[in-house]
């Protein structure tokens, strides 16, 4: 494989930061492999987003402003990505390791008879072979995994693992023909928004997470959200908090939830069991606030403040806001 | 309706794990094997649906695992599944996502199903690629991340599909594959009666020879190979600060963030 194709996840033209991270990495890989870097943007808003993407060093941005992509679940996306890959020839398809990205990856990999690597945090190339670097087994092992017996590879890439760098733009934007002879089985009847349009947890540079120690749903909005806003981050939660129904499961970080790698992770009232650690141990800096000095998170956090989070968090929010006001 | 739940047997999350430097595979000797935590939710969803539909609805647990996994499969049967199918063959060792999905799909064609339910992710490999690939090889739709099955039967399914910001109501035909999230409900514990009853339930074993595959699986058929393994950079123990009050605790964090140039 020598070409690299980025699958662009978006909603009505609004994309995630990981798109730009992938576009930047695609160029580097394509240059090393001696191929081209492409992006595929599908559905309503594709053209607008393609315009934004031209600032990144891609060769061609394929678009399909096709309403079926938004009306039918996943199948149209798989068909389009397959078509782009077949046209491009042997290639590596990069998708974000998100809920939708994982869906796309499994299907596209099967369609292309491709190898699949997942939750990738780095790539190396050895003699024209792409090696995906990824943590496995709850982060206890880092594996370097190569593709073989195949002309195609698909990799789901962890958000925040690569730098996004605009520049070297000038990509051609090319409209795709609709794959012929396809029928779509799964109809999206309606879509309900429950969380406000916040930035995706996976790509937030700062995550403020709450656990059992918060005692109920309210402190997530009254305590953690203001601190997250002050630091330009997003609010997350432990499984205990999600299981208790205090926050939706979409905020849950850990083994059975989301995996995040922010620059800063603040865990309030979270003990840090292995199930939680899996989801946040690659954060740049980890700060924990807990009443108990013996919590497991003390084994791998950078700073553990033993005290009352209900008093500490509001004070900290004030200090951060104050510092910003004077900046 | 015939519901089949695919499950993976994984090493216990809390167990210390070691990779054999020669084979670059997990050393499974001495490791307790458990049902992949995500898959317990898939079983729960299947049992809930069986209770709701009643009649001749059955739940079959399907796994690809060595014979030694039988005892773990009994746990799924003890939860309330009716029977189990194990695809078990030394020739499957070293299978990656591609080879696993391909072999499983051929076996599932033999088993047959109206609704195939899978967990969203495996605890050990974290790939999440198998369900989608299974759907491709089986030629059925894949409705992923279901948090609630609104209705299933008469050749139709309608379900709430979780998204990052809410949910979508998606409908489609049966047979289909769905994956479920933890929002379907906490997996039930096996009752004593269930545990006793599980001993009498049938576990059918399929081998590669039963499938008539036209492609290589196992290490030979895999489309990925692990070249290197290494240990991650260990994190140090935390600097611990005892905070007498809110202000001093906040100050400690604030100073630390300054020091790290995060503010």
Image (cartoon, coloured by chain):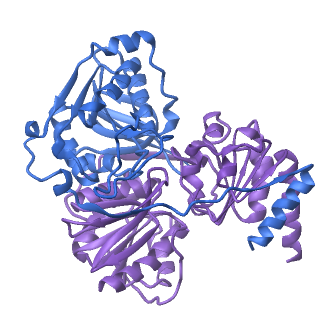
Chain colours: A purple, B blue
Q: Quadrant of the C terminus of chain A?
A: bottom right
Indicate whether B157 appears above or below A303.
above
A231 on left or right of A48: right
Indicate whether B142 appears above or below B234.
above
Q: Position of residue A150 (x, y in %)?
A: 20, 66
Indicate whether B184 appears above or below A67.
above
Q: Position of residue A288 (x, y in %)?
A: 73, 52
Indicate whether B127 appears above or below A162.
above
Q: Position of residue A103 (x, y in %)?
A: 38, 53
Q: Quadrant of residue B109?
A: top left
A52 on left or right of A67: right
Depth order, front residue of A72/B164? B164
Work out whether residue B90 can be spotted: yes
Q: Quadrant of the N terminus of chain A?
A: bottom left
Counting labels gives 0
Work out whether residue B172 can be spotted: no
């Amino acid at each position: 494989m020598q070409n690299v194709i980025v699958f662009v996840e978006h909603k009505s033209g609004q994309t995630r930061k990981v798109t730009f991270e992938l576009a930047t990495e695609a160029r580097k890989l394509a240059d090393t492999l001696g191929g081209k870097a492409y992006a595929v943007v599908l559905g309503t808003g594709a053209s607008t987003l393609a315009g934004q993407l031209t600032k990144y060093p891609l060769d061609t941005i394929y678009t399909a402003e096709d309403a079926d992509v938004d009306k039918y679940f996943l199948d149209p996306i798989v068909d389009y990505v397959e078509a782009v890959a077949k046209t491009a020839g042997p290639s590596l398809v990069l998708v974000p390791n998100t809920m939708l990205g994982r869906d796309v990856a499994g299907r596209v990999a099967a369609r292309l008879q491709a190898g699949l690597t997942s939750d990738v945090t780095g790539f190396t190339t050895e003699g024209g072979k792409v090696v995906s670097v990824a943590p496995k087994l709850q982060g206890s092992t880092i594996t370097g995994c190569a593709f073989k017996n195949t002309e195609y590879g698909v990799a789901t890439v962890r958000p925040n693992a690569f730098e996004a760098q605009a520049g070297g733009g000038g990509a051609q934007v090319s409209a795709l023909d609709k794959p012929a002879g396809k029928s779509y089985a799964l109809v999206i009847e309606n879509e309900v928004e429950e969380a406000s349009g916040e930035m995706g947890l996976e790509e937030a540079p700062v995550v403020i997470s709450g656990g059992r120690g918060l005692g109920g749903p309210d402190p997530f909005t009254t305590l953690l959200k203001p601190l997250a806003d002050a630091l330009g981050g997003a609010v997350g939660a432990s499984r205990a908090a999600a299981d208790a129904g205090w926050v939706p499961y979409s905020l849950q970080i850990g083994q059975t939830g989301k995996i995040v790698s922010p620059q800063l992770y603040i865990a309030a009232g979270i003990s840090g069991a292995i199930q939680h650690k899996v989801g946040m141990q690659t954060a740049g800096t980890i700060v924990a606030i807990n009443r108990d000095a013996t919590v497991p998170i003390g084994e791998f956090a950078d700073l553990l403040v033993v005290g009352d989070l209900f008093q500490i968090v509001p004070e900290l929010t004030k200090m951060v806001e104050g510092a910003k006001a004077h900046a | 309706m015939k519901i089949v739940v695919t499950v993976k047997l994984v090493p216990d999350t809390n167990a210390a794990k070691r990779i054999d430097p020669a084979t670059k595979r997990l050393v499974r000797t001495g490791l307790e094997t458990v049902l992949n935590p995500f898959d317990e939710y898939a079983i729960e969803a299947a049992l809930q649906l069986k209770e709701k539909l009643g009649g001749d609805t059955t739940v079959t647990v399907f796994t690809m695992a060595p014979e030694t996994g039988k005892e773990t499969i009994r746990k799924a049967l003890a939860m309330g599944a009716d029977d189990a199918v194990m695809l078990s063959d030394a020739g499957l060792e070293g299978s990656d996502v591609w080879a696993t999905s391909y072999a499983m799909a051929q076996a599932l064609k033999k088993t047959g199903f109206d609704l195939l339910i899978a967990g969203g992710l495996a605890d050990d490999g974290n790939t999440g690629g198998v369900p989608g690939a299974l759907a491709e090889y089986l030629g059925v739709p894949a409705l992923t991340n279901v948090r609630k099955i609104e209705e299933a039967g008469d050749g139709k399914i309608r379900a709430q599909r979780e998204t990052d910001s809410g949910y979508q109501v998606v409908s489609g035909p049966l047979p289909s594959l769905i994956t479920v999230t933890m929002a379907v409900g906490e997996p039930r514990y096996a009752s004593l009666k269930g545990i006793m009853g599980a001993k009498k339930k049938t576990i059918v074993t399929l081998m590669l020879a039963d499938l008539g595959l036209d492609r290589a699986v196992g290490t030979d058929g895999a489309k990925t190979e692990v070249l290197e393994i290494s240990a991650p950079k260990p994190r140090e123990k935390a600097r611990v600060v005892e905070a007498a009050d809110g202000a001093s605790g906040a100050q400690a964090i604030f100073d630390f963030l300054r020091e790290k140039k995060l503010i």
